[in-house]
Amino acid sequence: MAFFPTIHPNHSASLWRGIKVTIFPTFLCIILLQGYYLYTTGKPTFSRIFPTLSNPANSTEATPQTPPPLPPSTDPIQLASPYGAIVTPIRSSENLTWLHALANTWTLNIYNVDNPSQTPGYAIPTSKGHEAMVYLTYLVTNYDSLPPYMIFIHGHANSWHQLHPTVTLIRSLRLPALQAAGYVPLRCDWYPSCPAEIRPVAHDAVVWGPGVHRAEVEWEIGRVWGAFFNRGGEGDAQGAVPETIASQCCAQFAVTREAVQRHGVEVYVRMRNWLMRTTLGDDVSGRVFEKLWAYIFTGEAVQ
């Protein structure tokens, strides 16, 4: 019995013609497609299909690329610059060159908290409450001439509590959305402050984050509520202490002039006076305002 049957010569010739008709055009097609891809993209298909096998030194896909700039907006709200003010505290040791990338579209208000002589015209009464003293001083000093939009930030380009560099966050901000909302935090993640971090009435909050000074801040908010909000002045917020206070952490946000001016300037003066007089440490007094900024500008206890 033959294991390999004999192939008739005529059959062999036919088979070879079929191979030539089928294989050679396919191979030619592959070469043409490869050439077209190289011509249009300048990159070999190998590095695209197998990026982990290509040489990292020669591959543009081996390192993160800078995201493309946002397309220009046609909304008239965003066409006129400067759009508003950026307010930030810094220390003498900090380098703010990164922030000057925004100087052509925002007015920079930089407060040097340990050496005011380095930032003439931006003095604070005293350095207390971390960023809160700077924020309140800007509002009190400029209340009658506030720009349409303000962004309050720390003096760092990156931090654990923001998903992107500060410049990227600000450039990504949509002013029509800010105008509609009145207040927008620069952090979207709820951790570690929401949805019910501060319970100033029942004091029964379930803490799932680090809870740094949470209890002291909670008790202090209950004590200062009347002094901050219930004096009965025009534009003053009224009402009892909310059962729950919660908003995104870390005191970086954008706000509109209308949201700031829902209170009279005397409210911000009272807040700053309390901050100047309190004997609480900066970590506590600063966090009192961190937990209240959203309420101050929106009247909503839970953001």
Image: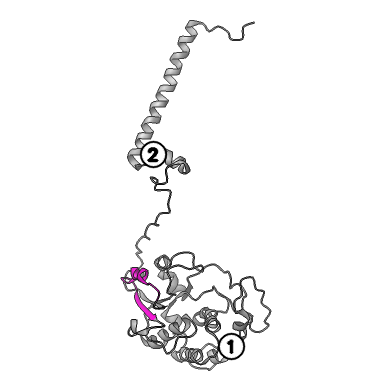
Task: Give the side of residue 42 with respect to residue 229, left or right.
Answer: left
User: Residue 5 appears at what percent x and percent y?
Assistant: 58, 8
User: Residue sitting at 32 percent across and 69 percent down?
Assistant: 79
* Spatial separation of the CA atoms under disc 2 and disc 1: 67 Å
Q: Which residues are magenta?
A: 93-111
User: Residue 12 appears at what percent x and percent y?
Assistant: 48, 10
Determine contact: label 2, label 1, CB under 8 Å. no
Tell me if residue 25 is in the magenta stretch: no
Towards the viewer: 257 or 192: 192
What amino acid type should be assigned to the residue bearing mark 2?
Pro
Task: Give the side of residue 187 with respect to residue 155, left or right.
Answer: right
Residue holding disc 2 = 44
User: Residue sitting at 44 percent across and 22 percent down?
Assistant: 23
The N terminus: image quadrant: top right
Disc 2, SS: loop
Disc 1, SS: loop
Task: Give the side of residue 79 with respect to residue 54, left or right.
Answer: left
Residue holding disc 1 = 239
What amino acid type should be assigned to the residue bearing mark 1?
Gly
Q: Which mark is residue 186?
A: none
Residue farthest to the front, as pictured = 93
Asked if residue 1 shows in the view, the reply is yes
Q: Nearer the viewer, mark 2 or mark 1?
A: 2
Category of crowding for the residue at label 2, using alpha-carbon neighbours closer than 10 angstroms: few (below 14), some (14–19), many (at least 20):
some
User: Residue 125 appears at what percent x and percent y?
Assistant: 42, 90
Category of crowding for the residue at label 1, using alpha-carbon neighbours closer than 10 angstroms: few (below 14), some (14–19), many (at least 20):
few
